[in-house]
């Protein structure tokens, strides 16, 4: 459903008007906090030229190797993790993210010495950079970790009331989906939205199995659902949103290019999608640019992209 910014958004895409695109409310619902800032922002803050990423990575391992060598090691040596975290909120302000769901890992919490410490720290950043945003912090668990300690952490952190959604990330296929049931039960108990990284490297059938086994409310990525009309119908019928990250998919080799990105097939089959950044510091494409790239490649029309923008903001 269009909003009062729709006309201006469509025009801004047609005119490739980045300044207007930045100023119009958008969402980013899949965004790993520690890698959520812009490379240029970090370069300025640390007075260090971080190199641009290559056009494509050799899968998740290739991405991780580049990140460690080009960014992480320098940040570690200069104690810059908090600056990167701040940059994630700064970007929410700069790109006018009116709905913003950064994803926290346990290291983003545990070093603040308890629930009160971390909520205070993050809330102050939110107030500083994006006070009017609908802020929906997500807690992410690594797919390869032992479930039992993760269940304990989920109990502790979800009881705080701070987190609005849960994710399992960091690679698909480590365990059968049923292994994660105890973790998703905790999310259910605290009425936390249930998400998972699935169908990024995995198949349409994986997306379906994860939804049926874990009762997912939304899916991060899920792009390979586009290979199955049956799974797309399930997503469309149940209005299960896929939080899609186009540049991430292309750079990791899960999609060929923007023009052929599966988001086109998903949208044409009525699957609800949003457009997101994943790891902005790595993939180097802020959310305004994600929209523009899909428009310029002819993947989706300006009107279709505006409907996606509104779905990300209002879920309608
Ligand atoms: Zn991700």
Image (tube, rainbow, N blue to C red):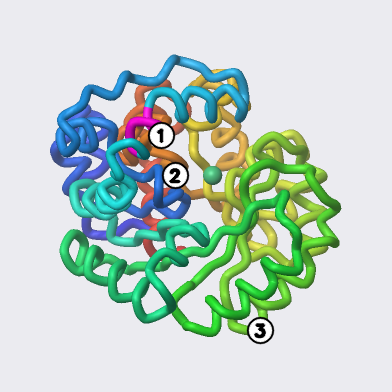
Residue 16 screen position, x and y as percent: 22, 27
Mark 1 and mark 2 in contact? Answer it, CB < 8 Å.
no
Residue sticking out furthest to the front = 77
Frontmost of labels 3 and 1 is: 1
Residue at 15% x, 30% y: name it.
Answer: 47
Q: Main secondary structure of the magenta part?
A: helix
Mark 3 and mark 1 in contact? Answer it, CB < 8 Å.
no
Instruction: Give, as a single range, the part of the protein colored magenta.
Output: 71-75
Q: Earlier in the sequence, mark 3 or mark 2?
A: 3
Give the class, few, some or many, for how many residues have Cα within 10 Å of label 2's Cα (few <14, many ≥20). Answer: many
Residue at 21% x, 31% y: name it.
Answer: 43
Q: Circle 1 is placed at which residue position?
A: 72
Q: Is residue 310 above or below residue 54?
A: below
Q: Circle 2 is placed at which residue position?
A: 275
Q: CA distance from mark 3 to mark 2?
A: 29 Å
Frontmost of labels 1 and 2 is: 1
């Amino acid at each position: 459903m269009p909003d009062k910014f729709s006309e201006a958004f469509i025009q801004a895409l047609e005119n490739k008007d980045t300044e207007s695109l930045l100023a119009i409310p958008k969402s980013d619902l899949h965004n790993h906090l520690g890698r959520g800032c812009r490379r240029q922002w970090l370069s300025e803050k640390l007075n260090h030229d971080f190199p641009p990423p290559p056009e494509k990575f050799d899968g998740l391992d290739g991405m991780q190797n580049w990140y460690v060598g080009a960014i992480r090691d320098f940040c570690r040596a200069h104690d810059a993790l908090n600056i990167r975290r701040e940059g994630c909120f700064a970007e929410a302000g700069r790109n006018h993210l009116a709905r913003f769901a950064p994803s926290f890992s346990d290291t983003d919490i545990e070093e603040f010495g308890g629930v009160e410490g971390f909520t205070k720290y993050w809330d102050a950043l939110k107030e500083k950079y994006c006070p009017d945003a609908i802020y929906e912090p997500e807690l992410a668990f690594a797919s390869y970790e032992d479930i039992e300690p993760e269940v304990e952490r989920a109990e502790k952190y979800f009881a705080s009331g701070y987190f609005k959604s849960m994710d399992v990330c960091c690679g698909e296929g480590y365990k059968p989906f049923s292994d994660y049931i105890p973790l998703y039960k905790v999310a259910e108990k605290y009425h936390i939205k249930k998400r998972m990284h699935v169908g990024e490297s995995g198949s349409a059938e994986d997306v379906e199995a994860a939804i049926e086994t874990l009762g997912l409310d939304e899916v991060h990525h899920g792009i390979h659902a586009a290979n199955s009309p049956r799974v797309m119908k399930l997503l469309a019928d149940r209005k299960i949103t896929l939080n899609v990250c186009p540049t991430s998919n292309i750079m990791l080799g899960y999609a060929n290019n923007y023009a052929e990105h599966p988001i086109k097939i998903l949208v044409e089959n009525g699957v609800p999608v949003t457009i997101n950044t994943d790891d902005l510091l790595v993939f180097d494409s802020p959310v305004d640019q994600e929209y523009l790239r899909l428009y310029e490649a002819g993947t989706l029309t300006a009107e279709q992209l505006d409907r996606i923008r509104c779905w990300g903001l209002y879920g309608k």
